[in-house]
Image: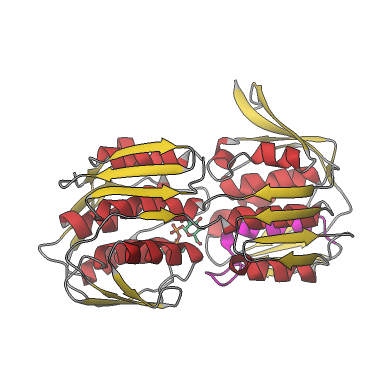
Amino acid sequence: MTEHFRVCGGARLVGDVDVVGAKNSVLKLMAAALLAEGTTTLTNCPEILDVPLMADVLRGLGCRVTIDGDRTVIDTPAELSHRADFASVGKLRASVCVLGPLVGRCKRAVVALPGGDAIGSRPLDMHQSGLRMLGARSEIEHGCVVAEADNLRGAQIWLDFPSMGATENILMAAVLAEGTTVIDNAAREPEIVDLCTMLAQMGAKIEGSGTSTLTVHGVTSLQPTQHRVIGDRIVGATWAFAAAMTRGEVTVHGVDPHHIELVLDKLRTAGADTTSTLDSFTVTMADRPRAVDFVTLPYPGFATDLQPMAIALSAVADGTSMITENVFEARFRFVDEMIRLGADARTDGHHAVVRGVDRLSSAPVWASDIRAGAGLVLAGLCADGVSEVWDVEHIDRGYPRFVENLRVLGADVARVAAEPHR
Ligand code: UD1
């Protein structure tokens, strides 16, 4: 037996939904706790599977971790193990973010490579070359990324691409390096800003947070801290798309609307009305959405994680949309599942062309990753009849209480245990 979501199409989503801390922030903040001996407390943590998986990675390195609802407490010992082997990291791609803190704190790290991902190749070359610039040796050996340094020294580092993961690992090594490090073409995502904020609270000296040039003046040690994780802008934006697609009215609490300014602008172009406060926003859509083009780019561009929602919206919009993917090449696998639901879509290299149809038609479909799964549920809400979305463990990794929230908003969605079709 395995679980799927049974999604009945037709409901208009109306009401309020609370969004908790960002998956793409909390996992890095947990890794940052390795940098300081003592007790670090994180609040507003999402109750998703990746948090206990990351806790296991930290336990494997010698930490004591307790998770109590939205609160995660990490006790980091004076002596850490520097090896994160496959048994602990294999289930969690983001576990590679322990690399930088381990090199910073222990001057050596052996971190197993979690392997490929359904959204495309995820190499670590920029992580490694950044650490080399700081004076570490780094190789891939026996399925692990190995990094060692006698001493880390500040350096000027230019990233080929503003990679979130490379920025985080280099930053977390540089905070304990000798001298000044400048990371140019750094990622500017709100989750990177959240990490910089927590590191600063721990005593790190960082300038340029939220810009593409991060300057880090190394310090000899950091102190543990308490920190509240920022709201998940990707989850918040998913609800914004859900409101627009179902011609509903949804107020999302717990997300800074500035973090999804571009999304709200796109939805307004599609015909939605939006209003915002400091930490909430409302999306109202009266009519069928109009077709809009989307281009994924690093922040502040349109997030690649929202590309499935953009395709799902385009599939039911009035007109033809072009969606261009610039970050993860394999994300268009999602289009094949959308075609099962009756979408008129085709891909050509980095582009997908989607001609909106009046109504999608229900079908069994399979989630290939977290965001594709959410996109399929949204599409199912706009389909005639009852769709089944399978492989929902992906959705559970990124969307806490997804089914419960959908039901509060009026959707007819249920989690069902059954024999899989394939
Ligand atoms: C993070 C997010 C993911 C999001 C992505 C892009 C987490 C846990 N995941 O992933 O949800 O979709 O940012 O916003 O935070 N690259 C290289 N070499 C490297 C590193 C990256 O070529 O050394 C390439 C990747 O293949 C990809 C691009 O850079 O094409 C962006 O990747 P990156 O920003 O590093 O993504 P992640 O940090 O893995």
Q: Where residue 278 sits: x, y (%)? A: 63, 66
Is residue 370 among the parts visible in the rendering?
yes
Q: Give the x, y percent position of residue 290.
A: 84, 66
Q: Nearer the viewer, residue 102 or 115?
A: 102
Q: In the drawing, does residue 297 fall left or right of residue 73?
A: right
Q: Quadrant of the N terminus?
A: top right
314 in the magenta segment: yes
Q: Identify the magenta region.
A: 295-317
> Percent from the top left, x then y, of residue 315?
78, 56
* Along the viewing direction, whichever of 109 and 120 lies nearer the viewer: 109
Residue ID at (52%, 51%): 21
Q: Residue furthest left?
A: 150
Q: Quadrant of ligand 1?
A: bottom left
Check the picture and name the quadrant holding the C terminus: top right
Q: Residue at x 51, y 58 (%)?
A: 230
Q: Is there any visible trace of residue 308 in the rendered image?
A: no
- Please name the residue shown 40% across and 43% down the image: 72
The part of the image, by quadrant, that contains residue 150 is bottom left
Name the image quarter holding residue 386: top right
Compare residues 59 and 147 and report the one nearer the observer: 59
Find residue 196 and report its image quarter: bottom left
- The number of numbered discs placed on residues in the rendered structure image is 0
Residue 295, relative to residue 244: is it above or below? below
Display coloring = secondary structure
Is 126 left or right of 79, judged from the image as shown? right
**Image position, residue 34 (x, y; %):** 27, 51
Left or right, 137 with reference to 58: left
Inspect the magenta stretch and tell me whether residue 165 lies in it: no
| 273 sits to left or right of 180 | right
Vertical order, 105 against 52 (above or below): below
